[in-house]
Amino acid sequence: MSAATALCFLVADTRHRIPRRPLHRYAYRQARHLVRRLLLASERKTFRGDDYRPGLAAAVASIRKRSRDVPPILLLTPDDLDPPPGIDKVVRIDPRRFESVRGAFYEFGVTVFFKLAVFELGSFDRVVYLDSDTLAVDDVSELWDPRCFRDHGFYGVRESKELGAHTDAAVGKFNSGVMVINRPMFDGRAFEQLMSLARSRASYDGGDQGVINALIGQPGGPYPAGELAPHYNVFVNDLTYETGVLDRIRPRILHFVGATKPWS
């Protein structure tokens, strides 16, 4: 294992999701949050659906339990946090850098583009990024093994209808919930190009996944991508329940992409 390898997760306080512009989206989002919390308070319940921190704790614990030679684990966040249990280092994101992006996926607001900051971690030769709604259910140490996945700058699992893609637009695209990113994409140019694509709204899904695919999908582009086996990013949602994918594929990483999260 290279010393310049890291695992990386991202969490952000839900207040970052509230868009500042346009005004009607800001007002609607604020009202939605207020009503939801009032209803839950009346039922003496705590809402966890928008808060990914419980998922982060479970995801990190699952990696450390089932895999070997785990590299340092980083946490990307715009918030002032001490390293949570299992996290080796907190890397602060400046959220103001992303305010120029418009037309973001509504549910997450501009926070959906915070993930692009992983492409700025230039002190590493490889970063393995995982969403905080993933769970490792088997050994995944191959992802940071320097003998594996070294021929391309980017590796991911392509979405398909069988694997639970929600829209036709996502079919054939790389899902950004589990990514292996290598040195060729850490020279600073990839991040700048991704931000430029985000500002130009060149995203089929209004989020980070769309701009990442727009960059690595450029014919003859500088960042050719390679594929991870599907068991590294097995969706858990209503579609995979119906098709029986969870029974046919022996997953190594479960990715709870539906509305229901393990901590909900």
Image (cartoon, rainbow, N blue to C red):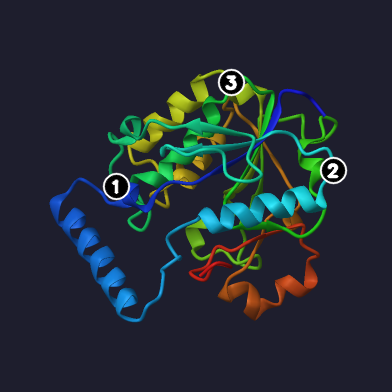
Q: Which residue is mark 1?
A: 103
- Judged by depth in the image, the label closer to the viewer, 2 or 3, is 2
Tell me the SS state at disc 3: loop
Q: How crowded is the residue under tag 3: few (<14 C-alpha within 10 Å), some, or many (20+)?
A: some
Check disc 2 and give the amino acid type: Arg
Check disc 3 and give the amino acid type: Gly
Specify which label sits upstream in the sequence, 1 or 2: 2
Q: At 37% from the left edge and 78% from the top edge, which residue is drawn?
A: 44
Q: Quadrant of the N terminus?
A: top right
Residue 119: x and y in percent read 54, 29
The CA distance from mark 2 to mark 3 is 24 Å
Residue 212: x and y in percent read 51, 39
Q: How crowded is the residue under tag 1: few (<14 C-alpha within 10 Å), some, or many (20+)?
A: some
Pick whichever, 218 or 257, lies toward us. 257
The CA distance from mark 3 to mark 1 is 28 Å
Q: Which residue is mark 3?
A: 122
Q: At 45% from the left edge and 65% from the top edge, which residue is drawn?
A: 48
Pick whichever, 99 or 217, lies toward us. 99
Q: Which residue is mark 2?
A: 68
The quarter of the picture where residue 30 lies is bottom left
Q: How crowded is the residue under tag 2: few (<14 C-alpha within 10 Å), some, or many (20+)?
A: few
Check disc 1 and give the amino acid type: Gly
